[in-house]
């Protein structure tokens, strides 16, 4: 027989909320924005929270902020698209616009974006918390720069470093550093030709794609060798026939 918990013990859902709030504090020490976002997402899904606009609105705002602050990867992209489909997001249109800008493959002007969302960000600083709030402002700019580089890599296979720096509103040194950092973190496949001042982008291929391409090229090579052998043999026979004649 299961005994009821004492009156002073929180309910299971309340314990769940407390647990995720503690995990948020833990992940905040490492500025792990994606995990913080996932914790807020779990709190947001608690029925008592989701049924009360006064409770879910500030949490949904935090989810949006930490989604934008998180580095781009498949998990972040999946959460971002799922959040965009949330009907409650229409109640905070500015944040819907923020997520739309990040998910749209267009270059974002940082100065315009910051000017538009600065007041919203300042209102959230106490929610993001102390030092994290200051660090988050720097990381937000970094995420926008990374977004813009990914956009450029989608539309260009090669571009001069100077033109890229102009598009990103950065110096040549800053543009080169950000590209190098993204390549090192495997978020981007690119090469910089310093003497020529050209950046070359490549799309990522999985191992199966590389193997299939290699097999196809090898088959074409063998076909070419076989045809060449036939042509050589044919020319040899013709040459012998001419000599006999």
Image: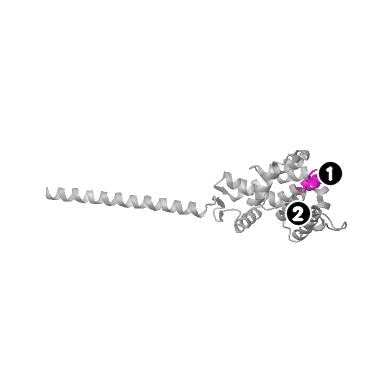
Is 240 in the magenta?
no
Quick one: 154 or 94, which is closer to the camera? 94
Instruction: Using residue 10 as the reference point, say whether residue 30 is left or right of it.
Output: left
Kindly report the distance in space between the C-alpha atoms of the residues bearing marks 2 and 1.
Answer: 25 Å
Q: Which mark is residue 4?
A: none
> Residue at point 74% right, 44% down?
113
Quick one: 176 or 237, which is closer to the camera? 237
Residue for badge 2: 136
Residue for badge 1: 54
Say whether residue 169 is visible. no
Instruction: Verify CB contact (< 8 Å) between mark 2 and mark 1.
Output: no
Depth-wise, is mark 2 or mark 1 nearer the camera? 1
Residue 119, by quadrant, is: top right
| First to last magenta residue range | 45-61
What secondary structure is found at the residue carrying circle 2? helix
- Image position, residue 238 (x, y; %): 19, 48
Instruction: Using residue 228 as the reference point, say whether residue 143 is left or right of it.
Output: right
> Residue at point 78% right, 46% down?
47
> Residue at point 34% right, 52% down?
222
- Dot 2 or dot 1: first in sequence order is 1
Total number of numbered discs in the rendering: 2
């Amino acid at each position: 027989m299961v005994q009821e918990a004492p009156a002073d013990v929180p309910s299971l859902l309340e314990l769940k909320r407390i647990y995720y709030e503690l995990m948020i504090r833990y992940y905040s020490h490492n500025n792990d924005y994606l995990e913080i976002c996932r914790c807020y997402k779990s709190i947001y899904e608690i029925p008592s929270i989701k049924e009360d606009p006064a409770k879910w609105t500030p949490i949904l705002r935090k989810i949006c902020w930490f989604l934008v602050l998180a580095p781009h990867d498949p998990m972040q992209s999946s959460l971002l698209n799922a959040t965009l489909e949330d009907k409650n997001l229409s109640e905070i249109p500015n944040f819907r616009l923020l997520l739309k800008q990040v998910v749209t493959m267009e270059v974002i002007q940082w100065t315009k974006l910051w000017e538009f969302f600065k007041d919203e960000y300042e209102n959230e600083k106490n929610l993001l918390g102390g030092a994290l709030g200051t660090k988050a402002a720097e990381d937000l700019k970094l995420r926008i720069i990374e977004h813009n580089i990914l956009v450029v890599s989608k539309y260009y296979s090669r571009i001069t470093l100077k033109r890229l720096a102009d598009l990103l509103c950065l110096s040549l040194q800053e543009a080169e550093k950000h590209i190098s950092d993204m390549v090192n973190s495997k978020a981007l496949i690119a090469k910089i030709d310093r003497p020529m001042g050209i950046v070359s982008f490549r799309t990522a291929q999985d191992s199966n794609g590389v193997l299939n391409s290699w097999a196809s090229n090898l088959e074409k090579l063998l076909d070419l060798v076989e045809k060449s052998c036939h042509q050589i043999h044919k020319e040899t026979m013709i040459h012998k026939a001419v000599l006999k004649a």
